Image (tube, rainbow, N blue to C red):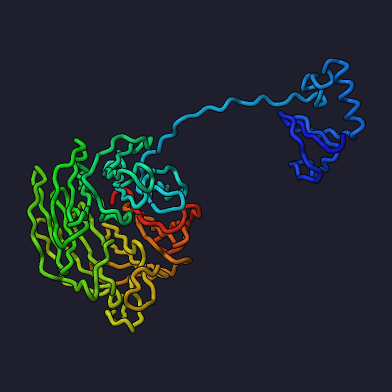
Amino acid sequence: MDGGFAFDHAVRQIPHGTETVAGSGSIDYHGAAMIRGTLAVMTSRNFAKALILSSLLGGAAFTQPAAAQTGGTTPPILETETSDVSSLPPATPHRVYISGGYGGGFSIIDGDTAKVVGTVNSAGSAAFAVAPDNKFFYVSESMWTRGNRGTRQDLLSIYDGTDLKLVKEIELPGRLIASGRIPFFSISASGTRGYVYNMEPAASVFTVDLKTHKVLSTTETPGCGLVYPFGDAGFASLCADGTLASVALDAKAKGTITITPQFFDPEKDPVFEESIVDIKSSKAFFITYTGMVFPAQLGATSKVAEGWSLQRAAGLGVATPDVQQKTWRPGGRRPFAYHAASGTLYALMHNGKHWTQKEHGSELWVIDTATQKVTKRIELLTDGRVVGVSQDANPQLYVVSGDGLFQVLDPATGKMVRHLTEVGGRTQLIAVTGF
């Protein structure tokens, strides 16, 4: 017999060569035998003699107790593997939800440890929302019965907020399949109703009762799109003519629509879809590509106030739609965050020309919305694709870069205090507890 063998629970042939074994250095497998992790070196001639002796003794040479074969050391007893179901710990103000990583779905991250504590599965281009009491997670999604073909299924999937088990699937008449943006699906302040934006082919919004799991109504919003809820009374939508539509819903979810005067130019300076809305207070900030901020109080008849410039708030000249003007402008996937209690707005900013609204931020600007002043400019270690902020008295800032680096920043210093590199790239959505 020429060559080596290894006995490691089962007999397997090993080619000539060397291999590193923990605690044993480099091992030459020519004429070597591995018996339950213990190396015994035999020449080919001695190994042949052992086989002959084994046959004469009825295999006794290789059926000795394991302790005898290993020099008196009894091998460890392997424990039987058991499965169980973990539960999420109670939600804290520092829980973060992000989507769009390499693994898909929505990752639940503990901001205090920068560790993933759970994942909610979803189809592609899904939208996500959390119940105000954190008891349920909602996923608005579409899929096909054969993956990329077959019967299309539009669903509002409901997951338990503790064990992440699927609770209910609500069939929808349709939904917009574009990307996982917050204004494509949002819920009311109390969490009793969900609003699903649809466009097949005209724009409309489905109102879903999240208690009875029934679709209550379809409200057509011609020329307007997206959903920005205000309290429990209804939602607003941005319109293609630069106005804002407000839809007040009655007990049966029948809508009454009012329209504001035009406040932005949709051709020259559109509004970011991911503008900020505080659903509880119904306060909103609609922000344009050049950085004009339009405060609004949403309601049955929404009121939009006069706009002010992010650049002027920083002591700079106002940005214009001139494609040759290079200045600081907002940009990213979700470039804004808002701390409701302090009235602080956070904006990812980059130095670029008009129509660069998709460029990731190199700085994070901190703005006092009451005084309309930039109080701090934080230079980021990497580019910023999305930004979020916790809503407690000691807030944390969250920034995810284009290549998937999740960072927790100290708002007071702008320094990164912890990070996570495993969230994947192209984050689509970020949300925090209580907002």
Residue 193 locus on image (x, y percent): 19, 44
| Lateral position of residue 366 relative to residue 297, left or right | right
Viewer-side residue, 112 vs 334:
334
Location of the N terminus by quadrant is top right
Res. 35 image quadrant: top right
Q: Please, is residue 108 above or below residue 370 in the view?
A: above
Q: Is residue 371 visible?
A: no
**Residue found 73% across the figure and 31% down from its top:** 8
| Lateral position of residue 59 relative to residue 126, left or right | right
Q: Please, is residue 398 above or below residue 188 in the view?
A: below
| Lateral position of residue 327 relative to residue 35, left or right | left
| Lateral position of residue 251 relative to residue 224, left or right | left
Residue 48 locus on image (x, y percent): 89, 28
Residue 428 locus on image (x, y percent): 37, 57
Residue 63 locus on image (x, y percent): 79, 19
Viewer-side residue, 317 vs 300:
300
Q: Residue furthest front?
A: 150
Q: Residue furthest bottom?
A: 324
**Residue found 37% across the figure and 60% down from its top:** 387
**Residue found 89% across the figure and 34% down from its top:** 44
Q: Please, is residue 96 above or below residue 50 in the view?
A: below
Q: Is residue 353 visible?
A: yes
**Residue found 25% across the figure and 50% down from its top:** 175
Labels in figure, total:
0
